[in-house]
Amino acid sequence: MSDKPKTVEDAILESVVTHTVGTNGGSDFAEDIHVLKSGAISKIEVRSGAEIDNILVYYGDVPGKHHGGSKGSPRTPFAIPRGYDIYRIEGRAGERVDQLRFVAKTADGSQVISSELFGGGGSPFTFDESKRAGASPNSGPKRWSYR
């Protein structure tokens, strides 16, 4: 039996859902199903200053929704090569998400890449796919859902 979901809808249902970070403002981070069907996450663009102001995720060549506002400065986009999956997101948050770093690796774990550290401040948090109860480092969902 294959570990791969049969449909994108199955993959979404198997998404990792984490606790809320930050307390004021903002909204749930969700993409339309037709965007998610466009492919794996290929690039993440961030605008930040003292806090994370905007995140834009590309699925294949298709951009999702802008999550956030227009403040902050554009940062170097984090390109995720084919064959890599995001497995950890590190950051800091107080009342808002202040800092983020995305970490991706190949399925066999032999190659790891990470984005620059966007923003600054707050208390640290980490969402690590391999630390989920019952998860092995290279199994389970590769899409993450955050509130």
Image: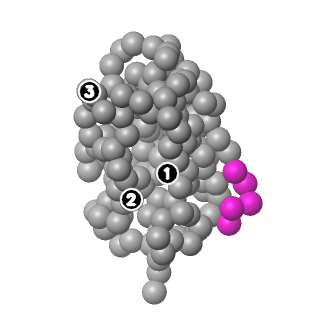
- Identify the residue at horizontal 51%, vertical 59% (top origin): 129
Q: Is residue 73 above or below residue 36?
A: above
Badge 3 or badge 2: first in the primary sequence: 2
Q: Which residues are magenta?
A: 108-112
Task: From the image, tell me which residue sits under label 2.
Answer: 16
Residue 127 marker: 1
**Relative side of 61 to 22, left or right:** right
For the residues marked 3 and 1, what is the alpha-carbon distance in whole angstroms?
21 Å
Is residue 61 something that shows in the picture? yes
Q: Earlier in the sequence, mark 3 or mark 1?
A: 3
Q: Residue at x 58, y 68 (%)?
A: 138
61 relative to 12 in the view: left or right: right
Number of other residues with Cα within 10 Å of mark 3, as a class: few under 14, some 14 to 19, many 20 or more: few
Residue 24 image point, x, y percent: 28, 28
- Give the dominant element type of the magenta stretch: helix, strand or loop: loop
Dot 2 falls on a residue whose secondary structure is strand
